[in-house]
Amino acid sequence: MKGIDLPEVKLSYKQKLILDVLTDEFHGQAFGPQLLEESDNENIKSLSINEITWAFKVLVESALVDKEKKLYKGRTLNLYSISDYIKYDAVKIK
């Protein structure tokens, strides 16, 4: 029996880094500024909030991350969460 070929998605270094940190350190969901403030990853801390926001925009458009407006430290921001495609390994990330 032949295996199923999963769809493949090629991500930039920053997009892959953000997705990995979101999955590993934040259990799949976080706000953009929260990544900068609370992550132990030095590579994430070297990014600007604009770079993180732009990478999240592409991840949302690729259906790899979902977003929802929530309150964070008194401001309404996007809470980013990994999508079911990532949760269930339904896509190959390159």
Image (cartoon, grey):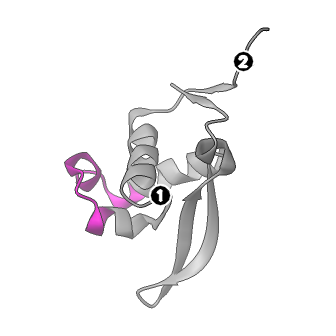
* Alpha carbons under labels 2 and 1: distance apart: 31 Å
- Rendering coords of residue 84 (x, y %): 67, 49
On residue 53, the disc is 1
| Labels 2 and 1: the sequence-earlier one | 2
Neighbours of disc 1 within 10 Å: few (<14), some (14-19), many (20+): some
Q: Pick whichever, 80 or 51, lies toward us.
A: 80
Q: Pick whichever, 39 or 77, lies toward us.
A: 39
Residue 5, magenta (yes or no): no
82 sits to left or right of 72: right
- Amino acid type assigned to the residue bearing label 1 in the image: Thr
- Residue segment shown in magenta: 36-50
On residue 5, the disc is 2
- Amino acid type assigned to the residue bearing label 2 in the image: Asp
* Element class at badge 2: loop
Q: Which residue lies furthest to the front in this view?
A: 1
Q: Which residue is drawn at 37% across and 69% down?
A: 34
Q: Which residue lies furthest to the bottom in this view?
A: 74
On residue 74, the disc is none
